[in-house]
Amino acid sequence: MNSPILAPKALTLLGIFIVSSFLVLSFSTTVNAQQKMHPLKNYSVNYELGGNAKGSKKQSSQNYGSKQCWIEVSETSIMGNTVKKNQKVITEIKDGEQWIITIDLDKNTGTKMKNPMYRAIAARMEGRDPKEFGEAMMKQMGGQIKGEKTVNGEKCTEWTMMAGAFACITEDQIMVESGANMAGISMSEVATEVKRNDPGPKGICSVGNAKIEEIDLGQMMQ
């Protein structure tokens, strides 16, 4: 990573790594509609971003984890390059698929795509407790329990994973700290407020009047 041109790509890859590592806990999925995907029906978390990224994130989990939404306002600096983000993400399980909507709030435009990994994760999740499944997935990613600590009043279990990734998760499966340190790039999210039995701010899971384009993630990856 000697060229500054690579910085945005490095940031994107790091972000993808963090998200793909931790979504299995937030978006524990199942092909059985009667099975809960998260122990809590609703909860919301406010995060402070740190490391190379500065900003905040508001996250909501609804209907036992079948819908997850967040709004992130941040500014990330890497090797002299700055990437600003004012973004809303909505994920929802519907008709046997998980859909991901990403909206640029400045442009009021976004994309909608199907998660190609959903069905495989769902098949493995079926009939299993969300916590049990989440811990199994963490271990599969090389996760090891480091110990326990308290993050802004929330007691959590510390995990370390591959490529410098880490997380701290409460007993009821809320991520109160996560991040990664890789190739000189550091990113973190620390919960500043956790509200159980709370669906989050009004409209956080609404597309509003944003113009949404459906895209094929499989083709993009090719």
Image: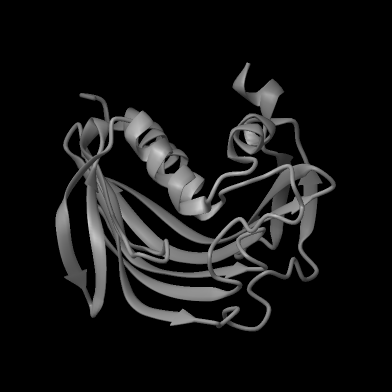
In the rendered view, how is the structure colored?
one colour
Which sits in the foreground, 220 or 85? 220
Q: Residue at x 28, y 30 (%)?
A: 142
**In this rendering, would 98 be left or right of 27?**
right
Quarter the C terminus occupies: top right
Q: Is residue 72 above or below residue 135?
A: below
Q: Total label count? A: 0
Q: Position of residue 181 (x, y in %)?
A: 20, 41
Image quadrant in which the N terminus is located: top left
52 shown above or below 127: below
Decide: is 85 above or below 3. below
Q: Please provide percent x and percent y for residue 200.
A: 57, 79
- Residue occupying the point 77% across, 52% down: 33
Q: Residue at x 68, y 24 (%)?
A: 218
Q: Answer left or right for 126 relative to 4.
A: right
* Residue 51, visible in the rendered structure: no
Asked whether, in this view, residue 19 is left or right of residue 80, the answer is right
Which residue ends up furthest to the top in the rendered image?
Answer: 222
Q: Position of residue 76 (x, y in %)?
A: 32, 53
Horizontal and vertical percent for residue 66? 67, 58
Figure quadrant of residue 36: bottom right
Q: Which image quadrant for residue 204?
A: bottom right
Residue 38 is at least partly visible in this image:
yes
The one of 221 and 119 positioned closer to us in this rendering = 119
Q: Does 1 sit left or right of 132 as displayed?
A: left
Residue 200 versus residue 191 in the image, above or below: below
